[in-house]
Amino acid sequence: AMLTTLAAPAFADIWHIEDGDITVKASGTEGKNTVSQGNKKDVEDTNTIITNRDKNTASSHTVTIEAGNDKVEVTLKDVNIKADSGSALTSKGDVTLTLKGDNHLTGGISDNGNYGLSGISSSGSLTISGGETDSLTAQGGSGTDGSGGRGIFSKDLTISGGTVNANGGDGKNGSGGSGITSLGSLTISGGTVTANGGNSTNSSGGYGIISLDVAISSGTVTANGGDSKDGYGGDGIHSNGVTISGGTVNAAGGYGGKVGGYGIC
């Protein structure tokens, strides 16, 4: 009889964050990633899924995604991370996060303890997508002498679906963190997005959303500036240009002991 050796089919491996920090990189082959965790180094993987065994217990391990010059897609399925220090998830390059279930990413505080860090920190182009029942809560860490961390911080950000809640951390002596900061463009083309700036005692409340340009074409967007007891309230949406061509947008400034924030500024 002739022996036929079949190549093992490529399948999605499931990576549990409790087992250690996870690094996902583009493999150079389209649609494939390499994943490293603990003693597993550069394991080739398709449709990478990151999850918690127990979604009710946060892990302090973090996720790093490096796309290089390629694109990387990662599915977050009932992930719960609360970083001790640094951001819960850091991405570099062109990265798409697909949400499944209920996900929580909370940033830690900085090494010197002064300011909070982001739930998600992206130095490239980040896209977040998911179905109606799939959600993400990104929470910035709180600051003591510095400002609160940002819920989501990105160079360019697109949200095309899912329920996304982005909350800035509170700042005690510094300002509250923003819910969403996008240094370039923020595009919302679907989903339910709620962005809340963090509160502050004697400085400024955080912005709900701050971005160079904001374009909203679909979905429901709620943006609330943070409150400041003795300082300035944060703006709901703070941007050079806001274009709303569809969807529902609610924006409110935060309370300020000196001056309240604007809804859209």
Image: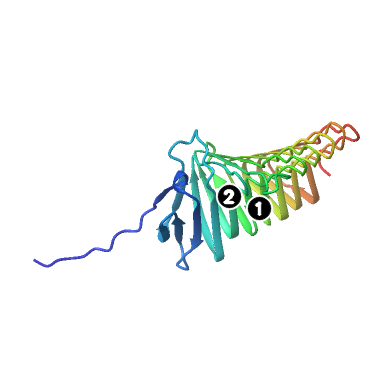
Residue type (three-letter) at the residue carrying disc 2: Leu
Furthest residue in direction left, as rendered: 1
Q: Nearer the viewer, residue 210 or 53?
A: 53
Asked which quadrant contains residue 130, the reply is top right
- Measured from the top left, where is residue 226 in percent x and y? 77, 36
- Measured from the top left, where is residue 71 in percent x and y? 54, 62
Q: Nearer the viewer, residue 244 or 110?
A: 110
Q: Are marks 1 and 2 in contact (CB under 8 Å)?
A: no
- In the rendered view, would you say 174 is above or below 43? above
Residue type (three-letter) at the residue carrying disc 1: Leu
Residue 9, disc: none
Q: Nearer the viewer, residue 14 or 95?
A: 14
Furthest residue in direction right, as rendered: 258
Residue where numbered disc 1 is placed:
157
Whichever of labels 1 and 2 marks the residue nearer the N terminus, that label is: 2
Q: Residues within 10 Å of mark 1 (few under 14, many from 20)?
A: many
**Figure quadrant of the C terminus:** top right
- In the rendered view, would you say 261 is above or below 181? above
**Figure quadrant of the N terminus:** bottom left
Task: Quote the CA–CA distance across marks 1 and 2.
Answer: 15 Å
Identify the residue shown where x is 87% and y is 36%.
231
Residue where numbered disc 2 is placed:
89
In what element is the residue under mark 1?
strand
In what element is the residue under mark 2?
strand
